[in-house]
Image: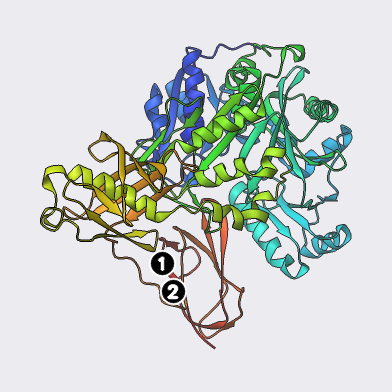
């Protein structure tokens, strides 16, 4: 039945809410958004025609409150609700609630969501639809003894995963039976917290496989089409970081088979709207196995849009309004290649721990041929309450090689000042031989992380020199006395680069030339983009260097917080420097501090207890993921300073130990 949609409430936040808003505007549809305390000043709020407050920052007290969201939709006269991805997007009860309220849910029917949302049930449907499935166990008996027995039958490694899950949450790999019980408990806890359901499945784990997914679209009346596949094998912590379409790993024969398998599965539940069928693929045997179906729009949907020329959000709205599919299978053509990189605020070298904090500056070169999907602006905060993805960069080219080069160019010219991020890792991944030749798999990042990190280490000395040159030229007539009265004498700037001390010793000649390591620095260009930031280009060692530089006075004329980006070099990772380091929490040997803000889930030790190296001390939950803090050496616990349920800041001492 057709229903005109003139006003849509977006039950989401951040990047995807902005993305949906843009299509609504293009279609002449009014946009209503909702927001929590943390998002009062969010970009998605300013994009909307109407905005309504729905609760506190934790998603359980705001974006997961289906009753409240429907109440807002009814009160403002919204015809439909678009859930985006995450939160309520795959919640069959919420879809039912929308139906009961007479509001169109822009997504599948409650029945389809229910059938495909539970992985164990979806697996049974796949088997009946003649879609290959992964060997494993998905029964009702959830006892640990049954899981251990089945794991022994399958052979290690195995994967414990939440039946109702997705996004890497509630997924734990077990490679040693001595870790099985702890892994089982962790998967249960994460599953319950993330999805309100602790039912687990067990599957054989393929350590060297590809992750291929197929975009499908159904009209709810029996017709389902596919929009080709996406390659999603570059992952960390079971979450994708680089996706592309089409996959470089499969040939046309496999493409046809895997896309048709996805269509058969969607047809079996009379699917309506956008959905994604995910598979693992063994490139050595060319065999694929059903993994799961996501009954929503995917984070990586832009690469499909780029190669097909279709607006997937517009298609969702058209199907939801009863207009049906705007294209037939024969109309869907593949044009070129597209790549998406997800920009996360995380500490790559610290195990990809998510980061939070103020974004001082974020920009992508306006001249680059790069689509940017983001909701982050200068002075916005990345909070601990939501996923730390801050942007998606998407490029398209006539070939994969062209798309890669465009992405590398965009990454090199991306400037991000704020929490630590993964920009340099993304660039190194794209340049790796394994990525270029397509031989990478889902474990590539984990297996090569040490070499990737070593390649992302910048020359801190050059970054410090860039700021020194920039600041020296900014002083102009207000040059410090040392510059004027003692030319030729060495001057020194002291920096702290994320804990590493760096000193820059230099001289200034009478004609105001800066000399570094007995070489005169050639100032090529210096421009100011604002009162507190700009660009500097200089020549040294026969090479030219260009940096994006900024500064913020914190406590006096010569006390600065400094930001320097390798702006046009091989990488784009930002570096934060403190010329005068602010007082930090002093952590003594034997102290175990929280690496990030979060909530204590479990404490495994007590005062007086002896622990061995590698033993678990605490589980910390941050941004919906559990992080284990383990002993780095043996010792005796002297103090336990936290308790389960306690919220802690980054740097908070959790456990204190002394030697045996």
Which type of secondary structure does the marked residue at label 1 adopt? loop
Residue corresponding to mark 1? 652
Mark 2: few/some/many CA within 10 Å (<14, 14-19, 20+): few
Lateral position of residue 201 relative to residue 349, left or right: right
Between residue 495 and residue 119, name the one nearer to us: 495
Query: Which corner quadrant of the image does residue 586 belong to?
Result: bottom left
Q: Earlier in the sequence, mark 1 or mark 2?
A: 2
Lateral position of residue 112 relative to residue 593, left or right: right
In the rendered image, residue 480, in percent from the top left (x then y), is placed at: 13, 53
Mark 1: few/some/many CA within 10 Å (<14, 14-19, 20+): some
The quarter of the picture where the N terminus appears is top right
Residue 410 in view of the camera: yes
In the rendered image, residue 627, in percent from the top left (x then y), is placed at: 56, 60
Which type of secondary structure does the marked residue at label 2 adopt? loop
Between residue 295 and residue 73, name the one nearer to us: 295
Residue contact between numbered discs 1 and 2, judged by CB atoms under 8 Å? yes
Residue farthest to the bottom, as pictured: 660
What residue sits 56% from the left and 77% below the top? Answer: 605
What residue sits 78% from the left and 18% below the top? Answer: 222
Query: Which corner quadrant of the image does residue 449 belong to?
Result: bottom right
What residue sits 28% from the left and 52% below the top? Answer: 515
In the rendered image, residue 164, in percent from the top left (x then y), is placed at: 69, 45
Between residue 302 and residue 164, name the one nearer to us: 302
Residue corresponding to mark 2? 641
In the rendered image, residue 390, in percent from the top left (x then y), is placed at: 47, 39
Residue 13 in view of the camera: no
Q: Is residue 58 above or below residue 244?
A: below
The quarter of the picture where the C terminus appears is bottom right
Q: CA distance from mark 1 to mark 2?
A: 9 Å
What residue sits 69% from the left and 56% below the top? Answer: 172
């Amino acid at each position: 039945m057709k229903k005109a949609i003139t006003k849509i409430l977006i039950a989401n936040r951040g990047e995807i809410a902005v993305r949906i808003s843009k299509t609504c505007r293009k279609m002449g549809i009014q946009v209503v958004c909702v927001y929590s305390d943390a998002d009062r000043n969010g970009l998605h709020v300013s994009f909307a025609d109407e905005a309504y407050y729905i609760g506190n920052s934790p998603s359980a007290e705001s974006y997961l409150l289906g009753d409240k969201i429907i109440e807002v939709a009814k009160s403002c006269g919204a015809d439909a609700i678009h859930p985006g991805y995450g939160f309520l997007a795959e919640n069959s009860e919420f879809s039912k609630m929308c139906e009961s309220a007479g509001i169109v849910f822009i997504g599948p029917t409650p029945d389809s969501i229910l059938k495909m949302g539970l992985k164990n049930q979806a697996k049974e449907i796949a088997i009946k639809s003649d879609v290959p499935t992964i060997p494993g166990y998905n029964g009702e008996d959830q006892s640990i003894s049954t899981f251990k027995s089945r794991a022994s039958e399958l052979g290690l490694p195995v994967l414990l995963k939440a039946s109702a899950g997705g996004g890497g949450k509630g997924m734990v790999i077990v490679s040693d039976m001595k870790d099985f019980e702890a892994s089982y408990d962790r998967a249960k806890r994460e599953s319950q917290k993330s999805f309100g359901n602790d039912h687990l499945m067990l599957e054989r784990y393929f350590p060297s496989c590809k992750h291929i997914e197929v975009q499908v679209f159904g009209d709810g009346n029996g017709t389902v089409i596919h929009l080709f596949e996406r390659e999603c094998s570059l992952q960390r912590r079971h979450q994708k970081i680089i996706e592309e379409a089409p996959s470089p790993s499969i040939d046309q024969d496999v493409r046809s088979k895997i896309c048709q398998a996805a269509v058969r599965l969607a047809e079996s539940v009379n699917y309506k709207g956008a959905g994604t069928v995910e598979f693992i693929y063994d490139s050595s045997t060319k065999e694929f196995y059903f993994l799961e179906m996501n009954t929503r729009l995917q984070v990586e949907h832009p690469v499909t849009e780029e190669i097909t020329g279709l607006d997937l959000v517009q298609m969702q709205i058209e199907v939801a309004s009863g207009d049906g599919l705007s294209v037939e299978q024969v109309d869907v053509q593949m044009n070129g290649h597209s790549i998406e990189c997800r920009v996360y605020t995380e500490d790559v070298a610290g195990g990809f721990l998510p980061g939070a904090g103020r974004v001082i500056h974020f920009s992508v070169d306006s001249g680059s041929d790069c689509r940017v999907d983001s909701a982050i602006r200068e002075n916005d905060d990345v909070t601990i309450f939501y996923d730390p993805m801050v942007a998606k960069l998407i490029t398209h080219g006539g070939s994969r090689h062209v798309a890669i080069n465009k992405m590398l160019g965009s990454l090199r010219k991306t400037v991000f000042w704020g929490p630590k991020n993964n920009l340099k890792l993304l660039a190194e991944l794209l340049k790796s031989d394994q990525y270029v030749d397509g031989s990478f798999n889902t474990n590539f990042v984990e297996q090569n992380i040490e070499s990737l990190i070593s390649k992302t280490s910048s020359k801190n000395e050059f970054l410090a020199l860039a700021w020194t040159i920039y600041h020296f030229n900014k002083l102009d007539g207000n040059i410090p006395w040392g510059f004027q009265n003692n030319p030729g004498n060495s001057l020194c700037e002291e920096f702290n680069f994320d804990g590493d001390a760096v000193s820059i010793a230099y001289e200034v000649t009478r004609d105001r030339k800066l000399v570094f390591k007995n070489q005169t620095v050639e100032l090529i260009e210096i421009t100011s983009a604002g009162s507190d930031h700009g660009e500097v280009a200089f020549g040294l060692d026969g090479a030219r260097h260009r940096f994006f530089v900024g500064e913020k006075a914190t406590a006096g004329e010569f006390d600065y917080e400094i930001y320097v980006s390798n702006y046009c070099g091989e990488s784009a990772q930002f570096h934060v420097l403190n010329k005068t380091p602010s007082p930090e929490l002093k952590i003594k040997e034997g102290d175990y501090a929280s690496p990030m803000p979060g909530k204590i889930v479990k404490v495994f030790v007590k005062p007086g207890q002896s622990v061995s190296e590698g033993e678990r001390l605490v589980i910390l939950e941050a941004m919906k993921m559990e992080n284990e803090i383990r002993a780095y050496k043996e010792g005796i616990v002297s103090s336990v300073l936290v308790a389960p349920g306690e919220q802690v800041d980054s740097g908070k001492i959790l456990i204190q130990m002394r030697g045996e």
